[in-house]
Image: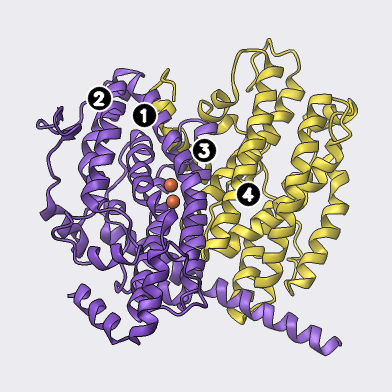
Amino acid sequence: MTAPAACPDPALFEFCLRMGDNTLVLGHRVSEWCGHAPVIEEDIALANTALDLIGQTQLWLGLAGEVEGAGRSADDLAFLRDAWDFRNLLLVERPNRDFGHTLLRQCLFDAWHLEMLTALCGSSEPRVSEISQKAVKEVSYHLERSADTVIGLGDGTPESHARMQDALDRLWPYVGEAFLPDAIDAEVAARGIAPDPASLRAGFDARIGAILAEATLSLPDSRFAHQGGKTGVRHTEDLGHMLATMQFLQRAYPGATW
Amino acid sequence: MYAQMIQSEATAEDPDKLAAFEARIAAGEKIEPKDWMPAGYRKTLIRQIGQHAHSEIVGQLPEGNWITRAPTLERKAILLAKVQDEAGHGLYLYCAAETLGVSRDELTEMLLDGRMKYSSIFNYPTLTWADMGAVGWLVDGAAIMNQVPLQRTSYGPYSRAMIRICKEESFHQRQGYDIMMKMAFGTPAQKRMAQDALNRFWYPALMMFGPSDKESVHSAQSMAWKIKMNTNDELRQKFVDETVPQAEYLGLTVPDPDLKWNEERGHYDFSEPDWSEFFDVLKGNGPCNADRMEARQQAWAEGQWVRDGLMAHARKRAARRVAAE
Ligand SMILES: [Fe+2]
Ligand SMILES: [Fe+2]
């Protein structure tokens, strides 16, 4: 349990954590590229994506803290929780590997994210709707870019094609988790705060299907889905290492202001 | 050696054209890419702009080293945006160099095989979060001192690139100083980090202005051509004069026992950095030379398949468009 018993709205709190932890963890992963991308233009573009995601994290985790009502700030939530309290999808914590893998992960996430945020713009919770309206503009641009790169590399040289197909095969089992509902999803859906995650699947499949077709990549036929990220029950081993890096200063020097 | 070479190249030029060129420079006119210019001028500019571009790109690494460990979301965003700016500076400068007839790829190859250099400051490690403050404050600060006069440099594209860059560099310096304030006025551990960062970056920052002009081989011709606008010693003095009061405000001690205000000169007296260390770092023996080069070589080598793939795709699309017409 992340939220203390006193939290007035545990489902909304959890939902905000899920949104904010996705952007926090993926923003962190993307920022790991800074200074190491294949061309300067890509370095700049990756930094832009990471900056947008960090900005969205501040909003989602800020709202989570507000909903929780225990005085925790976005930074407290980002830097002072351990892995089991993180609620991000497993997909976004997977390591960067090569540039193609990073961009394919981004494209898969962006396609889900865009469907989700589009639906959230009509949320019954005004603060959720407000954040989503801002974020959806950024994310539609993210998807444009990541899709272009996936298409370019998929339909590039034999080597780039093979690398992208390999990335897709590795990442595909981490896609399904985003669409599997649990009790929290059911509650926020019933209250009109967020869509039923399963309802986003058709839109996602259509988007990704079109991108992969143009990229000449073939969709793995298994729909097996690793789970445990958004519930926090079983993250991958990668998350703990990421947090050890990300949270180092806050943990080593508690109470300092930066 | 090189200065002599420039001299002979310059004098090998058509004397009438050369005289007209030098008259334009003396009159404060900008030289543009299509204008006639002496081969030595072109060569000196390619070297200087190329090295400057490389410095921006390699300069991403020491600060990039702390992006994943930034202590708050806001600090992470500020640092990431800063390092991204440096990549943008690299891009403007490679574009300025391209107007002189050398491609970005050629310049990159020259960096990676060691024919071209980048600023030695980036061969020093960033060891604590306070280094993010010290780098912005001192390294960007020294870079501004070097670059502000270059906004008036004689070559148009270089001058315009410097105008854009200088605006962003002054942000970087302020952000760096802001980190230093948080650290210097923070907990005892933070204050210790701040002092340690100043200790390690003070002399390397002074070295950024280059050796004393008496020993600098490139200075005289470059000053005449307004590729360079001030002497190294003038700029170093200006930097010390501006920075010492800022250190005092932070309650930090500049690591120079001989630092003293000289009433008569109206400047601080200060100790020279250890120039033998400077030349060691220049030769490749700085604490991070090998790591920095390896990181750039690795990024370039591992990016090859990406660049090839995207190029191949662009060709296929163009061919498909032609076929469709
Ligand atoms: Fe810069
Ligand atoms: Fe800078």
Residue at numbered disc 4: A49
Judged from this view, the residue extending furthest toward the top is A6
CA distance for labels 1 and 4: 28 Å
Q: Are marks 2 and 3 on the same chain?
A: yes
Amino acid type indicated by mark 4: Thr
**Badges 2 and 4: C-beta atoms under 8 Å apart?**
no
Residue B293, position as x, y percentages in the image? 33, 63
Which mark is drawn over residue B252?
2
Please tell me whether mark 2 or mark 3 is closer to you in this view: 2
| Residue type, numbered disc 1 | Met
Q: With B114 as the anchor, is A76 left or right in this view?
A: right
Mark 1 vs mark 2, CA separation in Å: 10 Å
Q: Chain of mark 4?
A: A
Dot 1 or dot 3, earlier in sequence: 3
Residue at position x 79%, y 25% in the image:
A127
Indicate the position of residue B188 as horizontal and vertical percent values: 29, 18
Label 3: state its secondary structure. helix
Which lettered chain is shown in yellow?
A
Q: Could you say where residue B306 lies in the image, as x and y percent from the top left? A: 56, 71
Question: At 89% from the left edge and 25% from the top edge, which residue is drawn?
Answer: A191
Instruction: Give the quarter of the image for residue B58.
Output: bottom left
Q: Say yes or no: labels 1 and 3 on the same chain.
A: yes
Tell me if the residue at label 4 has its CB under 8 Å from ligand 2: no
- Which of pointers 2 and 3 lies earlier in the amino acid sequence? 3
> What is the secondary structure assignment of the residue under circle 1?
helix
Residue displayed at 65% across by 43% down: A52
Alpha carbon distance from label 1 to label 3: 14 Å
Q: Residue at x 45, y 80 (%)?
A: B36
Alpha carbons under labels 2 and 4: distance apart: 37 Å
Which amino acid is tagged 2? Leu
